[in-house]
Image (cartoon, rainbow, N blue to C red):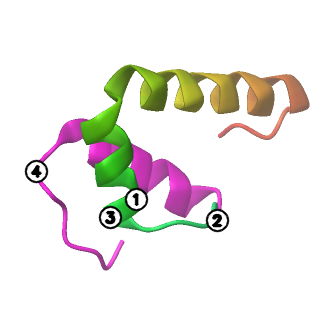
Amino acid sequence: MDEFCLCSPSVAMRTLYRTRYNIPGSILGDFISAACCPMCALCQLKRDIKRRKELGIFW
C-alpha cells in the first residue's frame, strides 16, 4: 500500500479496500473517518461491499 498505517484495524481495512478498488482518498481520511465515527465508517464500507456484490464486481 506504500502508506504508513496509523494502528487501527478499521483504518487498515478501509485503506486496503480503497486501494484495491481505486477509490480516491488517503490514509489520513481513513483515520479521521474511523476515529470520528467508526460506526458510520463501517456502514459505509458495508454498503459499498453490498453494492459491488450486486453488480458482480466484488472480489
Q: Residue at x 61, y 67 (%)?
A: 24
Q: Quick one: which residue is furthest to the bottom in this view?
A: 2
**Label 4 neighbourhood size at 10 Å, few (<14), some (14-19), many (20+)?**
few
**Label 3 neighbourhood size at 10 Å, few (<14), some (14-19), many (20+)?**
some
Q: Which residue is mark 3?
A: 28
Q: Quick one: which residue is furthest to the left in this view?
A: 7
Label 2: element kind? loop
Label 4: element kind? loop
**Label 2 neighbourhood size at 10 Å, few (<14), some (14-19), many (20+)?**
few
Looking at the image, is mark 2 or mark 3 earlier in the sequence?
A: 2
Amino acid beneath label 2: Asn
Magenta part of the chain: 1-22
Amino acid beneath label 3: Leu
Amino acid beneath label 1: Gly
Q: Is residue 53 above or below residue 35?
A: above
- Asked if disc 2 and disc 3 are in contact, CB closer than 8 Å, the reply is no
- Asked if disc 2 and disc 4 are in contact, CB closer than 8 Å, the reply is no
Q: CA distance from mark 1 to mark 4?
A: 14 Å
Q: Which residue is mark 1?
A: 29
